Image (tube, rainbow, N blue to C red):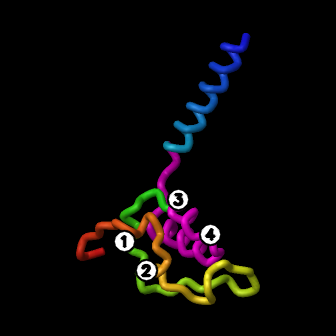
């Protein structure tokens, strides 16, 4: 009986993963908006995960300042440049010249 339960759980997990992978990817403008909004909340490293297509990160200006959401407590200073955050997804990012 235990093997049947384990097998059914694995099948449900595989189906959920396949469904997630089949969802259309958001466009870069939307992904970068999610990314910057996440940074504004002070989450930092967890924000790298909201961008599925890492090429979209090339569109984020490293010199752009991320400002904390007004009225919200942030662990970041009032304004911080993305380049100064040392985010794992931005460290070795390779972008073409036109990005």
Disc 1 secondary structure class? helix
Q: Is residue 23 above or below residue 92?
A: above
* Residue bearing the label numbered 2: 83
Image location (x, y in percent) of residue 9:
66, 26
Q: Name the N-terminal-most of marks 3 and 2.
A: 3
Local packing at callout 2 (Cα closer than 10 Å; few below 14, some 14-19, many 20+) is some
Closer to viewer: mark 3 or mark 2: 2
Q: Is residue 82 above or below residue 46?
A: below
Q: Do the residues under discs 1 and 4 have CB atoms within 8 angstroms?
A: no
Local packing at callout 1 (Cα closer than 10 Å; few below 14, some 14-19, many 20+) is some
Q: CA distance from mark 1 to mark 3?
A: 15 Å
Q: Is residue 73 left or right of residue 47?
A: right
Q: Nearer the viewer, residue 16 or 5?
A: 5
The residues colored magenta run 22-50
Which residue is most to the top? 1
Q: Name the N-terminal-most of marks 4 and 2.
A: 4
* Residue bearing the label numbered 4: 43
Q: Is residue 11 left or right of residue 86?
A: right
Disc 3 secondary structure class? helix
Q: Name the N-terminal-most of marks 3 and 4.
A: 4
* Residue bearing the label numbered 1: 58
Kindly identify the residue that appears in the image at 34 percent across and 66 percent down. Answer: 92
Q: Do the residues under discs 3 and 2 have CB atoms within 8 angstroms?
A: no
Secondary structure mostly seen in the magenta stretch: helix
* Residue bearing the label numbered 3: 49
Q: Quadrant of the N terminus?
A: top right
Kindly identify the residue that appears in the image at 46 percent across and 57 percent down. Answer: 52
Closer to viewer: mark 1 or mark 4: 4
Local packing at callout 3 (Cα closer than 10 Å; few below 14, some 14-19, many 20+) is few
Q: CA distance from mark 4 to mark 2?
A: 15 Å
Q: Name the N-terminal-most of marks 1 and 3.
A: 3
Q: Do the residues under discs 1 and 3 have CB atoms within 8 angstroms?
A: no
């Amino acid at each position: 009986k235990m093997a049947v339960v384990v097998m059914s759980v694995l099948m449900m997990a595989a189906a959920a993963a396949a469904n997630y992978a089949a969802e259309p990817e958001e466009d870069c403008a939307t992904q970068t908006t999610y990314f910057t909004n996440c940074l504004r909340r002070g989450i930092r490293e967890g924000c790298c995960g909201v961008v599925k297509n890492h090429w979209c990160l090339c569109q984020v200006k490293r010199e752009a300042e991320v400002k904390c959401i007004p009225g919200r407590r942030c662990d970041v200073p009032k304004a911080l440049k993305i380049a100064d955050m040392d985010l794992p997804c931005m460290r070795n990012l390779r972008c073409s010249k036109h990005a």
